[in-house]
Amino acid sequence: MATALKLDRIDCFYGDVQILRGLSLELYEGEVHCLLGRNGAGKTTALKAVMGILPVRAGSILKGEMALSRLAAHEVPKAGVAYVPQGRRLFAELTVAENLEIGLMARNKGEATREHVLSLFPILRERLRQRSGTLSGGEQQMLAMARALCLEPDVLLLDEPTEGLMPSMIARIRETVSALREHGVSTILVEQRVDAVLPVADRVSFIENGQNRETVDVARLREDPEMVHRYVGVG
Amino acid sequence: MTNVKSLWLHAAVILLLFALNFLLPEYHRGIFSRVMVLAVFAMGYNLAFGYTGLLSLGHAMFFAAGLYGAGLTIYHLGWSVWPALGAGLLAGTLLALVVGFLALRTTGVAFMIVTLMFAQVFYLTTLYFTTYTRGEEGLVLPQAMRSLALPGASFSLTDPATRYMAALALLTIVLGLVLILVRSPYGRALIAIRENEERMRMLGYDVFANKLASVVISGLICAAAGAAYAVLFGYVGSGFASIQYSILPLLWVLLGGAATTLGPLIGTLFMFYIIDTASDYTTAYLLVVGLALILLILYFPKGIAGTVRERWLPWLP
């Protein structure tokens, strides 16, 4: 299977504290790859490293032939990688339409992209003139994803997109991730909840102490639930 | 529809100001001329502070660069008004480019301090070269040099009515420019940078370049106000480069409403008249001004136009 993104033995630090210790990970084209691990294991840090928010002190991050770890942070999205951070981080003062426009402008995308994105999140079409800060949590999450998709990425990084959402919204987010896979988008999904991951992921990597302890197919995870208990501490 | 309403409102404000030229007594017409030029200064400041979130304490240097650029070329080189205005704009724009390039490597409090330091350097420079600037005493531009040549006619800017119309023309141009800018995709990008800089970077925006462009346009507008002030009022002095003139536009913008197009004009007008009125009755007029500001903050926490937008007119740009 072709590789969409490869993290090769990367080290990352917050100040003097080392968070990632030779973390390696391979994301295949068109797969949904989930990162599971306890709080502080380094899952979010790995996504930040890909986006260039945190410098990579050793190792490399490759997208095809391109070394993302050598790019400035604002150049990474132009390479086709989009990131939806934990907590959504919308531009609360701007309307839904303006938030989408900011995403479209970033890579000079036009009406066709906007329509495609709105077809994935029809609820947003009804809220276009509403200030994004006044949306519900689920709608904000959809807008954050929609804005990222305005970049037409081929690699999408989602950091706990289901956090704090009601079950119907979680199901909607899952459906969207599956739909994106059908469109060939490769996704790294950071989650704490195993039940949120199993229905949608193809493979799972267990992150512990800044390292990838093990990568397994979801089918194997279903056969061996003890594995989750071992790395995450919950079943 | 929102855009149409907003355009009508701005057109009405300009028309009202035009009519006031014929209605106001001489004294108030003079105040309005000054207010309109200084409101342009505040509009320039508002672009950096209100829309982009850059709290600068050094914008006096851009105003003063325009002031000196125009004033010194008229006084020492005998340039006419148009090239002198050009010199003022160029001086302010180049200064904003250099200062922005260096100061934008910092953020928050550090940015405030760095801009304040640059402005102090500029202020001290105007005091150091007193041979040319005459420091605090300043230069009075010869009346004969302050005539504005237009095709087929020449207007003396010492005439109060002409001065008023020239100030209104500048205000109209800058208000139009700011309105177009903040309604454009670039304007929305600036607001988004103010809201969440890191997120914009994650969306692929070169935040530094966008902020630098904002500072340069802001500097250009402030320099236009400074250059216009020199040719309209004929005085160029170091006082305009002092810290006071970096704080004043901040105050005007906060009073009128940060990140609103009309807020700077409202704030400048309000401050001028409250000081003017209070000082008629008491020498402790700053006490009255302080009280008025407290009341304003209590009832209009986002400035006059900002609160009006929040409570009644959400379409106000």
Image (cartoon, coloured by chain):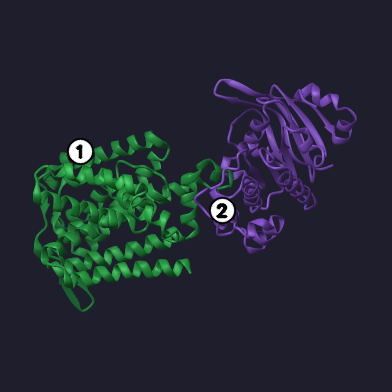
- For label 2, the residue is A99
| Residue B89 shows up from this direction | no
Residue drawn at (17%, 71%) of the image = B23
Crowding at label 2, few (<14), some or many (≥20) Cα neighbours within 10 Å? many
**How many labels sit on residues?**
2
Q: Which chain is green?
A: B
Q: Is residue B63 above or below residue B21?
A: above
Q: Is residue B167 above or below residue B294?
A: below
In the rendered image, which quarter contains the C terminus of chain B? bottom left
Which chain does tag 1 point to? B
Left or right side of A221 for A93? left
Identity of the residue furthest to the right in this view:
A223
| SS under mark 1 | helix
Q: Is residue A102 above or below residue B180?
A: above
Q: Position of residue B145 (x, y in %)?
A: 13, 63
Left or right side of B59 for A222? right
Q: Which chain is purple?
A: A
Q: Position of residue A105 (x, y in %)?
A: 57, 56
Q: Position of residue B18 (x, y in %)?
A: 24, 71
Identify which residue, B135 or A198, lies in the foreground: A198
Q: Position of residue B170 (x, y in %)?
A: 27, 64
Amino acid carrying mark 2 in the image: Asn
Tag 1 near tag 2, CB within 8 Å: no
Identify which residue, A110 or B12, lies in the foreground: B12
- For label 1, the residue is B124
Amino acid carrying mark 1 in the image: Leu
- Residues at marks 1 and 2, CA–CA distance in whole angstroms: 44 Å
Which chain does tag 2 point to? A
